[in-house]
Image (spheres, rainbow, N blue to C red):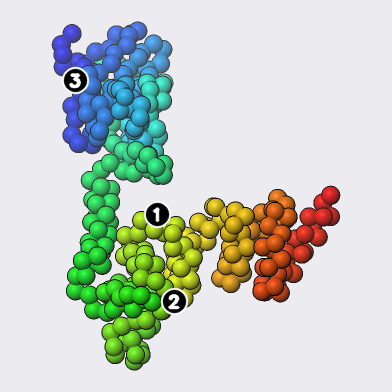
Amino acid sequence: MSDSAYRVDTTPRLAQWRIDNLASCTYRKSDPFKIGKWNWHLAVEKNRTLFIKLYPEISNFTRDNPPIASFIIRLISSAGDRKTLIHQDVIDKQIKSSDDFVWPVEVPLTGKFIIDVEFLDLKTAAPNSGELCSIWTEGLTEKQSNATALTSLGRMLSESIHTDIIINASDGSIGAHRAVLAARSPVFRSMFSHDLKEKELSAINISDMSIEACQCFLNYIYGNIQNEEFLIHRLALLRAADKYDLSDLKEACHESLMEDIDAKNVLERLQTASLYQLPKLKACCMRYLVRFGKIFDIRDDFNAFLQYADREIIGEIFNEVLAAWKGF
């Protein structure tokens, strides 16, 4: 049998295997063919039913990065009236082995036939998030464009490229850009749209933030924040997010503050939750104090807390205590 009997012709998204003759009871596997990042095989097995398989060549890369494929597969008989059978579209199917996609064809076929596979998309799972990411050019172009834009925004801030407004923190100043601030915050947008002193002086005073916290705040606005600096300045960022109406930053701080509640910070977090209306954080602090009994471990700090805490918080704590006692 000639080598051409196993060869699959390809374009970047199309694979076509021509089979001139298949005996009544036989099996044939194609040569590997490249689509996307993977080498693939087609295989046919004919007994009473014709089975068609599509699968990637086994390798360490395939095991670690299995393709998640969307494709249309057709079986075209070249005999007589050139009958075409089409499998229902396959969407986002992970294929690791020869058993993951098997198409049983019940219709009897004779003579020559063609297996035609049109790949609509190929994806892999991102290693950190598990999010599906297309490998095709348009997916990569979008990601590269977003990454480049964020990098450029970060450089605008870090290199003070054409800054047109000064942010005065409590212990220093930073140059920024009106357009970026206005696009990210409705408060800044309103500030620059009216005849306020910030518009006249080309400066904004944020005297309740240190220069380090203010830099972190701007890094977030420009899409250039690092996780370590975010964790250090969470409370300052929360205040700024509430003041300048950045709901996404406020929610990020809210979620983060729930992750590391302990005896040293629980009372401060409870006060913060009440001040900025963070219901999930408040509920977590209440559970920590009451249901897990940590209120007894910080008795002195809690007694001091009662001297200055809002009456509403005190009432909620005692209601939580009473509810917990009823459970015994």
* Residue count near mark 1 (Cα–Cα under 10 Å), binned few <14, some 14–19, many ≥20: few
In the picture of the structure, the residue carrying the numbered disc 2 is 208
* Residue count near mark 2 (Cα–Cα under 10 Å), binned few <14, some 14–19, many ≥20: some
The residue located at (48%, 71%) in the rendering is 239
Q: Earlier in the sequence, mark 1 or mark 2?
A: 2
* Alpha carbon separation for disc pair 2 and 3: 70 Å
* Alpha carbon separation for disc pair 1 and 3: 53 Å
The residue nearer to you, when weighing 324 against 101, is: 324
Q: Secondary structure at mark 1?
A: helix
State whether residue 3 is above or below residue 128: above
| Residue 7 circle label | 3
Asked if residue 1 lies left or right of residue 109, the reply is: left
Q: Quadrant of residue 313?
A: bottom right
Q: Position of residue 221 (x, y in %)?
A: 35, 66
The residue located at (31%, 83%) in the rendering is 203
Q: Earlier in the sequence, mark 2 or mark 3?
A: 3
Q: Secondary structure at mark 2?
A: loop
Q: Is residue 217 visible?
A: no
Quarter in which the N terminus is drawn: top left
In the picture of the structure, the residue carrying the numbered disc 1 is 228
Asked if residue 202 lies left or right of residue 284, the reply is: left
Q: Earlier in the sequence, mark 1 or mark 3?
A: 3
Q: Position of residue 206 (x, y in %)?
A: 39, 78
State whether residue 132 is above or below residue 265: above
Q: Amino acid at mark 1?
A: Glu
